Amino acid sequence: MRTIAEQTCCEKDQDLYPEAGSELKTAIRISNQIYTTQLAKQRGNLAAAKTAIQTLIKEFKPEKGEFEKYTVYIPNRQVFDKSWSRSFVQVYLNEKGDLSLASNYYGEKWMNHTSLRIIGPLQSVKTDSVAIENINNRHSDFGGTVWEKVTYRGKQADSVIGMIALNWDKKLKAVFTDSGKNTYIMWLEDYDKKAIKDSYELSKAFKMKIEAEKRIRVLEKKIKS
């Protein structure tokens, strides 16, 4: 808010230079029009993101541990109760839209795999390697069977998730590889490919919602009455 002295000074300037006051009003009106147009676009993005989230989130189970900052969403078909006794490629994301990928190996003998490659009709993509001693490379055994779960994060994992999501309706081969040359090969199940596609789209919707809300707050402050 301007002080009385500043207001008086401004009024004197407008008296001396009446065209300046008119130009200022015109500039404010033009900038308001620009910001209002941008605001309408962001509100449209926000509405679209909320609609997508509302539609997709039905296919996920939310989980939040006692010490976790964000809620994690796991595809309904890939929750532990339905998937503990099979080898498969898993995806999950949090409410910020951050995605993670995991290769789950279930068998009679240890494989000690450290990476995952997905092979499609026209391309092949591979995750980074996760060493056996890394906290993201987990092992357990039960009743004569073994279970390995390797979790991948970051740009390379995102590229693998994106490749699966964009080719979910095609036959895709998963290759689990250890630090040597041993491999375990399997075809991705249709419901796992769809789970990854849905996660990919939900991730984009979460990120669009967060970005739109941030821009709306900024734009609303820029519009002058």
Image: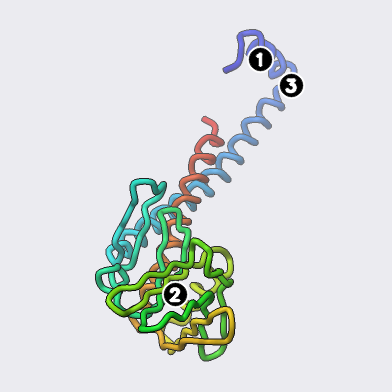
The residue closer to the viewer here, 169 or 154, is 154
Mark 3 lies on residue: 17
* Disc ID at residue 103: 2
For this view, does 161 lie left or right of residue 23?
left
Q: Are marks 1 and 2 in contact (CB under 8 Å)?
A: no
Q: Nearer the viewer, residue 145 or 185?
A: 145
Q: Is residue 98 left or right of residue 31?
A: left
Judged by depth in the image, the label closer to the viewer, 2 or 3, is 2
Question: For the residue labelled by badge 2, is the local secondary structure a helix, a strand or a loop?
Answer: strand
Three-letter code, disc 3: Tyr
Q: Does label 3 or label 1 sit earlier along the sequence?
A: 1
- Residue extending farthest to the front is 144
The mark closer to the camera, 1 or 2, is 2
Can you tell which quarter of the image residue 13 is in? top right
> Which kind of residue does numbered mark 2 sit on?
Ser
* Left or right placement of residue 186 versus residue 163 in this view: left
Q: CA distance from mark 2 to mark 3?
A: 72 Å
Residue 25: give x, y in percent of width and height: 62, 31
N-terminal-most mark, 1 or 2: 1
